[in-house]
Image (cartoon, rainbow, N blue to C red):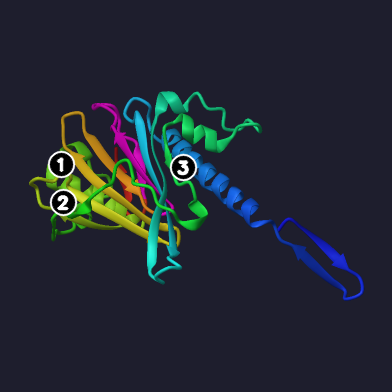
Amino acid sequence: MASYRYVAQRGEVVPQPLKQAEVHEAYARLVARLALRALDEALSATPAAFVDSVILNGRVNATDPATGQAVRACVVSVVAQREDFAELVLDEPRLDPQQCLHRLGATVSKHPHDLEPVTPIIEADLSRYRIITDTAVVATLDSRPDLLQMNPYDFERLVRELFEAMGYETWRTQGSRDDGVDAVAILNDPTGSSVFAIQAIDLSAGVVLASGFRGCPTEVSTSVVLRPRPLPLPPPAAVLPGLGTGTC
């Protein structure tokens, strides 16, 4: 709505709608702002030493008026390099979010309000990962397990159960032709789906690597590396959601 006016004779507040072109322009700006916000959140939440770029595919859940079928139209796709994104001053009032995406090399729908789709720059294909059954490992752990002493399979399962404690549904993948992915974790919520391809690596340095992408309204590919303190320092107690305490 552009404004509201009060009609005294009827005692009513009457809305004055925006012109259709203004609505479309406002929606295009909103899409650009959401894309920049998602990129900023992903890059801010990950270490610069391990995550150099983020892939984002912004999708819209809607109904195609031409067919009546549910669609997930991709209206923006971008690969943002951390170095390029750091040059943006996002809290500058005169910043144009649409020009920002253009500077980052994004592919943006010319008519996002009409769900005119674009081809994602990079698309994740989960059909490559074959799912197999697995057993729980947390029940066998004491209140302060030493993560570095766990065997690789229990360590992988523990990482998956951390995702499960946060509400994700996880599956173990079959260990061949899966790009090193050990498991898949999925969380469905009203805004879309979060999908993580999990790779748990048991090395002497104790590295956990989890990478994934975010579903509607955006898909974000990122990597997170967690390193425990080197022994023999006294291990601190880490609170694990729903799992008590453990050694990190």
Report helix, strand or loop for mark 3.
Answer: helix
Q: Give the image location of residue 116, x and y in percent.
A: 43, 53
* Labels 3 and 2 touching (C-beta < 8 A): no
Q: Residue at x 44, y 31 (%)?
A: 104
Marked residue nearer the N-terminal end (1 or 3): 3
Task: Look at the picture and state if 64 lies above or below 124.
Answer: below
Q: Which residues are magenta?
A: 216-240
The image quarter containing residue 43 is top left
* Labels 2 and 1 touching (C-beta < 8 A): yes
Q: Which residue is mark 1?
A: 179
Marked residue nearer the N-terminal end (2 or 1): 2
Residue type at numbered disc 1: Asp
- Which residue is the extreme one toward the right? 9
Q: Residue at x 9, y 45 (%)?
A: 177
Q: Give the image location of residue 200, x and y in percent.
A: 20, 41
Q: Is residue 215 visible?
A: yes
Residue type at numbered disc 3: Ala
Report helix, strand or loop for mark 1.
Answer: loop
- In magenta stretch: residue 21: no
